[in-house]
Amino acid sequence: MSTLIIATKNAGKANDFKLLLEPKGFEIKTLLDYPEIPEVEETGYTFEENARLKAETISALLKAPVLADDSGIMIDALDGQPGVFSARFAGEPKSDAANNAKVLAMLGELEGGSRQAHFHCTLVLAHPDKESLVVEGKVTGEIAQFPKGDNGFGYDPLFFYPELNKTFGELTDQEKNTFSHRSEALKQLDNLIDDWFN
Ligand SMILES: O=c1nc[nH]c2c1ncn2[C@H]1C[C@H](O)[C@@H](COP(=O)(O)OP(=O)(O)OP(=O)(O)O)O1
Ligand SMILES: [Mg+2]
């Protein structure tokens, strides 16, 4: 069985990756299993730059293949904000509740059709002596008028997905991992990963 380290400290993402990759025979570890690894600063201005920083830094440190995810939510009415700054939108320390409240306050009374948004995910798979692989995925929806659902993490309770008539916070794990930006990106990776590993 191949071990794959995910360069994340986000327990919600870690859970998504476990559900998505363990059935494919990967043993998943995350930075929560390596508390001694220092924080990698996300100094990039694109998802790819930040995902590369996380994957390539940790891969060089651990001398092992490492996958990183940089993701966020882009809201049309806010010209694509919070985008790369999604995790820190309401400032530090990062808080999902404060980020969600800030988004709702900025959108105010805008009606459904004007609340379009999408989740974006860029994945970078790095190896100490190979070129990194880069893939991405997205999913489109709307920002709900108020948070709904206790599943998932981050902006999930605000992200209304019209196809299922539910927010991502109301989806089962299986539904989220069928429709999410993360699963979309992983599908792209799936086509490439076997050759890359061998
Ligand atoms: O499926 C998702 N469902 C809800 N929210 C999500 C999702 N995917 C990304 N997001 C939000 C969470 C965070 O506000 C930002 C990611 O920021 P991002 O820097 O990539 O992750 P992070 O700092 O939480 O963990 P880490 O860098 O250790 O992987 O977008
Ligand atoms: Mg981060």
Image: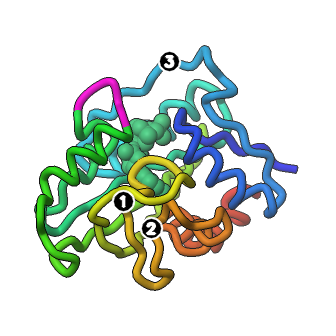
Upstream in sequence: badge 1 or badge 3: 3
Q: Residues within 10 Å of mark 3 (few under 14, many from 20)?
A: few
From this view, report whether residue 95 is shown above or below residue 188. Answer: above
The nearer-to-camera label among 2 and 3 is 2
Q: Secondary structure at mark 2?
A: strand
Q: Position of residue 21 (x, y in %)?
A: 72, 58
Residue furthest to the right in view is 1
Which span of residues is magenta-colored?
Answer: 91-95
Residue type beneath disc 3: Pro
Q: Quadrant of residue 66?
A: top right
Q: Residues within 10 Å of mark 2 (few under 14, many from 20)?
A: many
**Mark 1 — residue?**
158
Residue name at image x 62 percent, y 72 percent:
175
Residue type beneath disc 1: Leu
Residue name at image x 70 percent, y 65 percent:
195
- The residues tagged by marks 1 and 3 sit, at their Cα atoms, a distance apart of 31 Å
Q: From where the camera sits, is residue 23 visible?
A: yes
Residue in the foreground of this view, choosing between 136 and 181: 181
Q: Are marks 1 and 3 in contact (CB under 8 Å)?
A: no
Image quarter (top left, top right, bottom left or bottom right) of the C terminus = bottom right
**Mark 3 — residue?**
38
Residue furthest to the bottom in view is 163
Q: Residues within 10 Å of mark 1 (few under 14, many from 20)?
A: many
